[in-house]
Structure formats: C-alpha cells, structure tokens
Image (cartoon, coloured by chain):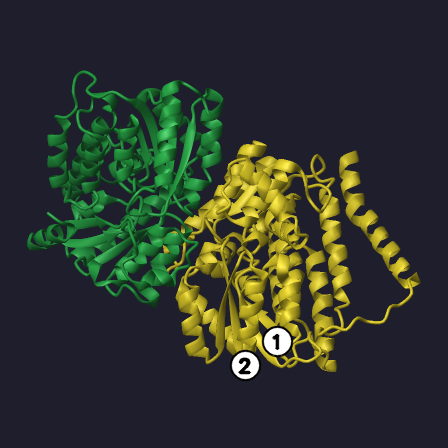
Amino acid sequence: MTRREHIEAQRERGRRSLAVLPVHYPKELLTALGVHAVELWGPPGAPRGDDAGRIQAYVCPVVRNALAFLASAAADAVDGVLFPHTCDSVQQLATLAPDFGGWSKPAFTFQHPRGSSRPSARAFLEAELRSLARDLEDFSGRRLDPERLAAAVALHDEIDRLRAALLDAGPRLAIPDAELYAILRRGEWLWPEEHLAELRAARAAVAAAPARAGIPVLVTGYVPEPMEFFDVLARAGAFVAGDDYAAVGRRVVRGGSAGATGWARLLARYASAPPCPTRVTDQPLRMRYLADLLERSGARGVIVHGVKFCEPELFDVPAIRATFGPRGIPVLQLESELESQLSAQAETRIEAFVEMLASGRAA
Amino acid sequence: MLRRARYEAAGRVVVPFLASLEAWQRRLRPRRAPRESPFGPPLESTRKLKELMTAHYYQGRYADGAVPVAWVTSGFPIEVLRPLGFHAVYPENHAALCGVRRIVPELSDAAEADGFSRDLCSYARTDLGCVATGRTPVGRLPRPDLLACCTNICQTVLYWYRALAARFGVPLVLVDTPYVYGEAKPHHAAYVRAQLEELVQIAERIAGRRVEPDALAEVTRRAKEGSVLWGECLATATSRPAPWTGFDGFFHIAPIVALRGTEACNAYYRQLRDELRERVRRGIGGLREERHRLLWDNLPIWFAVREVSTLLASRGFNFVCTSYTNAWAEAGSRVDPADPLGSAGAAYTHVILNQDLPHRLETLGRLARDYGVDGAVLHSDRSCKPYSIGQVDLKERLAADAGIRVLLLEADHNDPRAWASEQADGRLTAFMESFA
C-alpha cells in the first residue's frame, strides 16, 4: 500500500490527514483526535518541482524539498500541515509556504521550549501542547477526552517498547538492517495501530542467540537517507547496533510515562525522550546518552550520518568527537544531501571505516 | 579592589588620555589634500565612536576579576544585567570587528580544526576560533562568568553559546523567545516573562547582589531612550540627500548593540543625531552626489563594506536605510520603564528576525516608502538562514508592492571565502545600469 492509498483509506474511516515536518511532535495528540500523521522528511531525491528554488541552495535539502513537495500537487492528499519547531530553517518554512504560497490548507505550528529542564520551559510545553490540542480539535471536529488521550499514550508507549526491542536487538536481529529500517520508517505514515501490528510481527525476528555476524556500529544523525546506506554497511561487514537517528531512535521513549496519567503522562513521555539537538537538550547529557548507548550496544565505531547544512547536528560533531576520541572509538562523518543513492565516495569511506574497525585500529 | 581600580581607570582615564594624545598628534600632522572620493565629508562623530568602542574593549581587558563579565547575544535583554554591574561582551560585535579586519579565515580555520563545520554561521566560527587561539584585534577579551543567550535572532546562537559554556565551564542563561507567527500567543509572553524572572535570580547569584528596582527602571529608561535616539539618527536619512550612508550606519550601530542601557551610548547618539541634523540643514550628503536611493536587507558583508559602498557610491547610489540597523530602533517602542520585565519580554520577542515573513515584507515596504528608495539589495547571507530564507519571495513581492528594482546578492556576512568579488561587482554593476 502506498502512502496515498493509506491516506485515502484513513479518510474513508473518517480521519483527516496532516503532513508533519520533522522532527518532534506530540503524535499522541493526533492519534487521540483521530488525525492521521504523514511525516515529510524531504522527501529524498530531486526536488519535486521548481519551488525548491525559492529557498537558497545553502539551506538544508529537507526544507527545500519539503517546500517543493508541498507546493506540488503531490501533497494535496492531506488536509493540513504541522510544522514543529526544529531549527531556523523549518521555522522559516512554516511562514514561507503558508504566507507566501505553496500551501493553502490549514497550517499549524508546535514550538518546543529550548533547554527544557527549567520550570518555565515545562509550563510552556504544557501550554503549547494544550494550545495545539485546541487547534487540532477544530481541525478534526472531535473533542479530546481524557480516555482517548490515555489510550493514545498507551498505544504509543507500546509502539515505542517494540521499536526499542528491535533497535536493541543488535546481533540477535535475524533480518537485515535495511528491512528493519523499512519497517520502522513505515511508522512515519502508517496509522499507529497498523504500525503496531507490523512491529509485533517483526518482533519475531529477534532471536534468542546471535543471528548475524559483523562489526557493530553506532549511527547518529538526522534521517537515514538514502536507505541504501544500510545495504552498503552490510556489504562492508557491519550492522547498526545502536541507533541515534533523529527520525528513528531519538523518538523512541523508553518507559517514560509509567505511573503518570492524563496530560502529566504526555509531558512525562516528552521529558523522557532521548536527548536531541533539534530540541536543544543539554549537550553533556546527550554525550552521556551516546556513550551509554555505545557501551550498551557493544558498538566499536560511530558513524555521524548528517544532512548537509543541518546546524543542530553539525554543532554537536565536535562534542561527539571529544566524547569518543579519547576512548579510542573511531568516528566517521558522512554528509548526505538527500540523494536518492549513496555516492561511490561515501561507499568507499564506509568500506574503509569498517575495514579499519575490523582490523582493530583506532582512528 | 586593585583590579576594580584598574578596570575603572582603563575606561575613565587611559582611553580618554590616549584619545587626547591622538587629537594632539592629529593637530600637529600636516593637513593632506582630501582624496578624490564619491563620499561626502566624513562624520566628525566617527572619532567619538572609535573612542567609545576602544574604551569599551580596552576596559574589557581588565574586567575579569574586577566586575562580573557576561558574554551576551545581540538580542539579549541586557537591561537585567546592567544594574548588577556586569561588563557585557558582545561576541557578534567582536566577530564583526574581526570581519572588518579580515582575519576571519584564520580564526575559522581554528574552529574547523576543532570540528566545527564551515557550513555553520561565520560569526560563530569567528568567535569559537578567537576562543581557541586567543587571537583578537582588541588585545584581549575578558573571560566570562556568565553566558547570556536569547534565541530571538536565531537558534544558532544557542548552539554557539553551548559550545562556549562547555569551553569556559560557566553558566549559560537562556531567554527563549517563541517565534511569532501572526500574533504572539498569551502563553508565549508568559513564558518569556517567566524566563526573565529566572534570569534575574541567576544573575543576582553570580553578581552577589540584588537587582534594585529603581536601577532596573533607570537602565530600562536609558535603553528605551538609546533606541529612540538611534531611530532619530536613522530618520535623518529620509532627507535628500541623506546626510550619511546606510553603510555608515553599520558601524555607528555598535553602541546601541554593545552599550545599550548606558548613558555613554545615549550621549554618543545625541551627538551623532545633532551632527546629522546639522548636515541635513546644510545640505551635506553622505555621497557627493546622491542620484539613487537604496534599501539594504540583512547583515552587512563586513569584509567588503568599503568595496561595495565605493562601487555603488561611484555611480551615485546610496543605501539610505537598512532593515538591520532599523531593528535596533524599533525595539524601543515596546519598552516601558514602569514594567521593565514585562515590556522587555514583549520588546525582545518582537524583533524582526523573530517574526514571520509578512511582517518582514511590511517592514521592508515601510522603509522603502519612508526613505523614498528606488531600489533594494537583499543580501542573501549564507551564514544567516533566518534572515535569508524567504528572500527570493520577498524580492518579487517588494518589487511589485513598492514598485522598485530589487537585487538578490549572495554573500556571507563574515567569511570572505564565500564571496566572489568579480561576480558581485558584475551583478551590482548590471543592477545599477538597469536604473539608466
């Protein structure tokens, strides 16, 4: 089933669809209100139309491609768009497309508090969530009752539990990374219950004993594009043991909402999400998280897989190097421009990196 | 005590003495015939500006250990820190100075060697390079006790200041201003207000004293007055010919950025305003012959200000207004000394870079009308995404709405490696020829 077919199927069930820009947004609220989220990570490949040219070439391709996509007929299947605050570029896209052309359907924004540990930030987050909920109630024509919210939060807790189990499987995973990520990323547009069913089926692929060999690596970055990256990694003799992609692992909440109820449970989920530079969470906290992830996963090297011009990710690279360098953990930095295929140079670099890890030489 | 005395003496005695010495030497030097130039006579106030900023940076050399030191983003509500005696250092202002002195490539190299990408903001790379190497054109920057960051100009500053916090191991206080799409929501204003109250507590702890309400009100009043005075300076350019150029404004903006809320800042702008008004009265222009009037959008190209302004001036084109310098004049209208924190929240949330594109278009259109421009140059700044995204559309809309010619010029505000001089020369020349 294609995204468009799935959107149509949701519409037949009385659900309106919302295109959602990266990265973090309260999907639980959308689910509770019967709003179908279809995430827009570019899409990758060449821009779908001339509108990408309305944004300078020195801006991240996710934003340029998204403008082209929204402005083309390709996005007409959805009923609105949500722009979470992720970075300066997505922030500007959120006014450019609705105000200057490219998007004429409803547009919503959701702003994160940066530096979320302060009392003012926690209060702001709750107010912003409630404000978005009111907007979405109007959009969906439904009221957000506590039971629906509780059920949605529980559903996403379960989804995250299974996603975590798959991401943590490491050598015990009996399917290739490319297949795993295809399943995980279908969650970007499947209705959550259908995604849950696929995750449950995939859970059977986690074996009791190691099912695959190779060099375990930790991957951190924005979005795993092109997905061919995983095939190249596998051919080179490595697999993803630890995931810190903004699009994937950084959105997996591990047991954060247990014990809380209602809005408090939603806020607890948000607070428990892994640290992410797009939310400007504390950098030392993030480095400790990555170091723990490396240790937990047994990864022997780190691949920073970023998107060109992505400031939130780029600013953390020196800290990542400083975290792993002294431990003798090699770090490879790759940059993508949302190409539809991996360049030969990138492939060579991955191969050389894995070869170096296999030989036991530090960077 | 000794350090404090040295700090005070540096600003109050040494710099005025050096300025007097320079004036005396100047009087003794034989007068040279003025060089052929498309520009009008230089502003007398420029000497005072140099003295003021030299004093600021010279005094800063002796600030750490004498008074609490804060490194502050340009859009930070400094009014809260001034009553506590903080010496404020503005890394953006300092980075611009490095840009003018053309030392950014080597500083950026140092930052890049530490792992910071060349795709990051060149102000950030300049500053991080200064910190890494200790190299600065001002002799020495004092070590901060506090880093104070406001996100109203971009999110980039927060990443940059986090890197500084890691380097110096000092607290980072944040005033996070939600972006204004249309109208600011009540909970956004409440959030900013609450952060300002949190900021007061942290700053008081570092300074070891309390913020006196009267002192806060007085600094707020001075900041508002400074903003108004700066606006009056800019407004003199509505006259024909404009008594100065917009590029002059890029340099004379330094006190309202770095010394906002001080009497020295306001005294300077009174002097500048009076001089500009006198030039208007006498018909003295920023250019010898002003044939066309232009609007500039975005930050200056610091390392090429002279090059660009001379090229344009040689054909009688004068930038009479800029959205960048105007931003510091607009902030004051929302400031209210009777409600320092509440009004600071509103003022610092509603800066041009924290508002949506319709607001930006409205501002550019208003400037175009008020200053009677017949063209505009939008600097597409590789290092400033929030200022640059949307300019392709702004170009078309501004041209249609205001009936003026508009050029999009790609460059970088601080890194000359992203600047193609010949190409820019060609584009600007073709733009000017279109007015024939």
> Tags 2 and 1 in contact by the CB under 8 Å rule?
yes
- Chain painted yellow: B
Quarter of the image holding residue B335? Answer: bottom right
Amino acid type at mark 2:
Phe
Does residue B329 appear in this view? no
Viewer-closest of B114 and B176: B114
Mark 2 or mark 1: name the one nearer the start of the chain: 1
Amino acid type at mark 1:
Phe
Badge 1 density bin: few <14, some 14–19, many ≥20, Cα 10 Å: many
Label 1 sits on residue: B317
Badge 2 density bin: few <14, some 14–19, many ≥20, Cα 10 Å: few
Chain of the residue where label 2 is placed in the rendered structure: B
Label 2 sits on residue: B435
Viewer-closest of B177 and A353: A353
Quarter of the image holding residue A282? Answer: top left
- Chain painted green: A
